[in-house]
Amino acid sequence: MPNTNPSTTTIERLNDKNNDASKKSLVNYSFFLGATKDNLDEIKKLNNNCGLKIFMGSSTGDLLVDDDDILADIFSVCNKIIAVHAEDEKTLKEAEKSVTGDSFTNHPDARPVEAAVKATTKAVELAIKFNKRLHILHLSTAEEVEFLRKHKSTGLITAETTPQHLLLYSPDIYNEIGSFGQMNPPIREKYHQKELWAGLKDGTINCIATDHAPHTIEEKNKPYGQAPSGMPGVQTSLTLMLNEVSNEAINLEDVVKWMCENPAELYNIKNKGFLRTGYDADITIVDMNKENTIMNKDMYSKCGWTAFDGKTTKGWPITTIVNGNIVYDNNKLNLDIRGKEVEFSS
């Protein structure tokens, strides 16, 4: 994602990130360019990367684009998939005025359903107007699922949700772990989960994502209003979904579709996502009988924590193969392997 330091808002910075990843990343990679109010010329140059990211509402970082005319200009010139953080900034500002006190249970009220629905509606209208591919990031509301379901026939709109939004709910998560359950858009009331699951199963939502945001424990320990939003998710996402298979809520083919095949297809990634002749050997081997407890101390992320600390799951990845090379096996990383920049079909 582009909301790093410095923000990835130019092709030069995008190239720098790719160069850095080529020296460090154990897995394959691609990076989003971030939209700003004045980088249209950079957006026009986009070529072999995963796409453009627009923050329609303020979140971590400073990449806010909330002007309707500028949004229209961006949609009109972008030739790559447009991924949006869909929260309406004006609605967020109004909602924040009504929030009092310092409880983290305020977070869903400060970033209400209405903000998400307004932004998603606006993004879909722009995608249809300019005939552009739109991807709605980290979908969190039942209302958005219902709205997107009516527009899937356009062939332009895809969406994702996260294990956090599928498995955690308000207010319990905020009462239990406070800021460590705070992300944008927020973890919401439990009734939203039913529609998110339904949206996955009927194809309205295409894939499971992580929204990985590795804020440190020190940052997260700040009081409400100062603690940053976001949580890590990469390491725990697969076992959480495999656990749902073990619970017979979904089947293994669903997980393969949502976490492997569909992401490769919706981003037009070359030679990825399937076990096929001529495709890259990117393979994760799982043990569906393995039970383990997710623990903060076992997190590889530098942040050193997870919102699922203490949760026991059944079904775990045991081996990861990247481009035919074993990168992870039985809790050990092979630090000698490097991934490569992925390529995209036009």
Image (cartoon, helix red, strand yellow):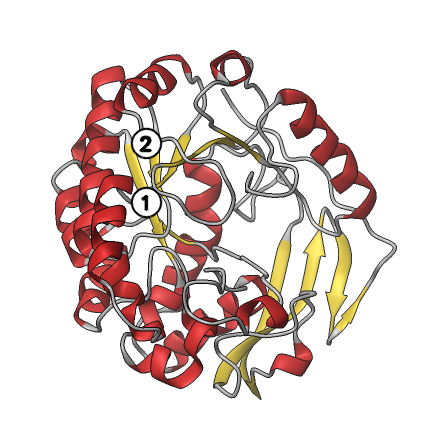
Comparing 193 with 258, the one in front is 193
- Residue 235 vs residue 27: left or right? left
- Position of residue 163 relative to residue 269, above or below, is below
Instruction: Residue under label 2, please give it.
Output: 66
Comparing 258 with 234, the one in front is 234
Q: Secondary structure at mark 2?
A: loop
Instruction: Residue under label 1, please give it.
Output: 159
Residue 42 seen from this side? yes
Q: Secondary structure at mark 1?
A: strand
The quarter in which the N terminus is drawn is top right
Residue shown at 24%/64% (left/top)? 99
The x and y percentages for residue 228 are 49, 60
**Farthest residue, direction right:** 336
Residue 199 seen from this side? no
Label 2 Cα crowd, 10 Å radius (few <14 / some 14-19 / many 20+):
many
Q: How many marks?
A: 2
Residue shown at 50%/66% (left/top)? 237
Label 1 Cα crowd, 10 Å radius (few <14 / some 14-19 / many 20+):
many
Q: Earlier in the sequence, mark 1 or mark 2?
A: 2
Comparing 198 with 35, the one in front is 35
- Residue 152 vs residue 65: left or right? left
- Position of residue 87 relative to residue 132, above or below, is below
- Position of residue 291 relative to residue 114, above or below, is below
Residue shown at 51%/67% (left/top)? 238
Q: Amino acid at mark 2?
A: Asp
The x and y percentages for residue 336 are 88, 55
Whole-angstrom CA distance, mark 1 to mark 2, is 20 Å
Q: Amino acid at mark 1?
A: Ala
- Residue 277 vs residue 143: left or right? right
The x and y percentages for residue 85 are 37, 43
- Residue 335 vs residue 135: left or right? right
